[in-house]
Image (tube, rainbow, N blue to C red):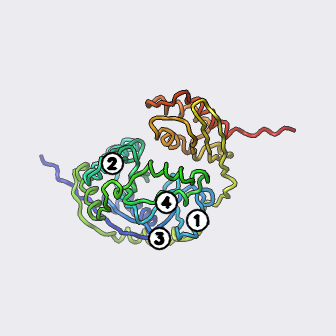
Amino acid sequence: MTIQQQTWRLLDTGTQAAAQNIALNRALLDARQAQQSPNTLRFLGFEPCALLGFHQSAAQELNLDYCAEHGVAIQRRITGGGAIYFDTTQLGWELYLDKQTLGTADMTAISRRICTAVARGISSLGVNAEFRPRNDIEVDGRKISGTGGAFDGDALMYQGTLLIAFDVEKMLRVLNIPAEKLSDKAISSARERVTNLETLLGRIPERSEVIAAIQAAIAHEFNVSFAVGELNTVEQALYQTALAEIDHPEWVGMIDLPASDRPTLTAVQKFTGGLLRVNVAYDQVKQRVKQVWFSGDVFISPRRTLIDLEAALRDSHVDNLDGIVRDFFASRQVDMLTLTPADILGLIKMAIQPVEVVA
């Protein structure tokens, strides 16, 4: 018996303001959860904007003065995670599916499957893209697409951002990060961590070319075909309701914590292998390490080790730091000369340890 191939909907909503794109996220996810819309692959673009995670405060995460001076809109996503910068040099891709289609609710397995498929699509453009756990797509060790997913009941929204031609320096200046990470050397280092299709191909590929490549890869992975579609009446109504809430200062400002409540703590230590500095964005009330930045002149190979460790430590409770650092170095081969994982862990704890008040 031959199983009939399913047809999914293909949406290309073009380049829009951040509020419109986020409202569409809400509408499409709610409609998929209510079984009022089909499985959908959506492509989208953003006008320049900084997107907060749902639980973040703009004052803590963003350089608000820079955003205002350079016309970077500020919006809040419906999902968690960290702040990101979006502009017209990036292509967004999203899947709206149900658990039955996926056959699992394990986000690790879902990320691997979807990212591996999209990596094949990107590779068909003439590069060597690969999935890198937990949820990145890279070319020769350099990130070209970051992704993430979230369930709402039985419905999944899985999102990715593909760098077509990207301004790393602007991204760094939009985000509220330590000033030393904005030095010429730090910006050059950041450029070495990411790549884009323009750099790899020597040209900027047509939007339609990139869309066709990813679409074909998703179609092959899930054994489906695609039909170009539009929002149905249910989705349109949900979109208008969501836009009225999201395109409003109260949505962006629903969490308004001062930057002083999220101090960036610093520790520096000289080891035999060189100097290492750590900056930690630390929530002292919840005892959570929100973000870590390493810098210095220590020798570590592979070079991206500390970058990956920064990602592993993001939004971690202090009680879990030992296990995270131990498991991180146990799972890979790293050459640090005389520097040890215990040295790195000790430096982080040095930064966040409470200051004792002497009476």
Between circles 3 and 1, the one closer to the viewer is 1
Residue at 42%, 59% in the rendered image = 166
Q: Is residue 40 visible?
A: no
Name which of mark 3 and mark 2 comes first in the sequence: 2
Query: Where in the figure is residue 243, as x and y percent of width and height?
Result: 48, 70
Query: Where in the figure is residue 95, as x and y percent of width and height?
Result: 35, 56
Q: Residue furthest left?
A: 1
Label 1: which residue? 66
Label 4: which residue? 85
Q: Is residue 333 above or below residue 290?
A: above
Q: Is residue 336 above or below residue 175?
A: above
Q: Is residue 149 above or below residue 255?
A: above
> How many residues crowd around disc 1 within 10 Å: few (fewer than 14), some, or many (20 or more)?
some
Q: Is residue 272 visible?
A: yes
Which of the 4 image quadrants contains residue 197? bottom left
What residue type is disc 3 on?
Answer: Thr
Label 1 element class:
helix
Q: Depth check: 356 or 66 in front?
A: 66
Q: Depth check: 324 or 300 in front?
A: 300
Label 2: which residue? 114
